[in-house]
């Protein structure tokens, strides 16, 4: 699980890079229900995904290896 909080930035989309291989990244609710699967972008051995949060927004993500 990964919880993100936008403390002071704007609401523009941001790219999050992962230093390990994953099969799936999903945005979930606090009770574990899946909202949506986020598309993965492969850059060689690295993977990344894009997330957009409003200022002071919180998102919970489930990362599956």
Image (cartoon, grey):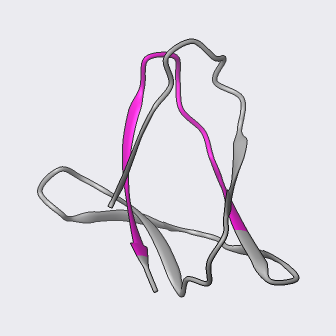
Task: Tell me which residue sits at (60%, 39%) in the image.
Answer: 52
Q: Is residue 43 above or below residue 59?
A: below
Q: Nearer the viewer, residue 1 or 33?
A: 1
| Magenta residues, start to end | 48-63
Side of 46 where 6 appears, left or right: left
Please say whether residue 60 is one of the residues in the magenta stretch. Answer: yes
Residue 27 image offset from top left, x and y in percent? 40, 58
Side of 34 where 2 appears, left or right: right
Please say whether residue 61 is one of the residues in the magenta stretch. Answer: yes
Which of the 4 image quadrants contains residue 12?
top right
Residue 35 image offset from top left, x and y in percent? 35, 60
Outermost residue, front side: 19
Side of 18 where 64 appears, left or right: left
Task: Tell me which residue sits at (53%, 32%) in the image.
Answer: 53
Task: Tell me which residue sits at (55%, 83%) in the image.
Answer: 22
Quarter placement of the N terminus:
bottom left
Q: Is residue 9 above or below residue 14?
A: above
Residue 5 image offset from top left, x and y in percent? 43, 30
Majority secondary structure of the magenta segment? strand
Outermost residue, right side: 44
Residue 9 image offset from top left, x and y in percent? 63, 17
Task: Tell me which residue sits at (54%, 87%) in the image.
Answer: 23
């Amino acid at each position: 699980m990964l919880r993100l909080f936008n403390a002071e930035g704007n609401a523009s989309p941001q790219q999050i890079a992962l230093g390990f291989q994953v099969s799936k990244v999903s945005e979930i609710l606090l009770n574990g229900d899946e909202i949506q699967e986020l598309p993965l972008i492969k850059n060689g051995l690295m993977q990344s995904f894009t997330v957009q949060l409003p200022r002071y927004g919180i998102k919970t993500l489930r990362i599956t290896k």
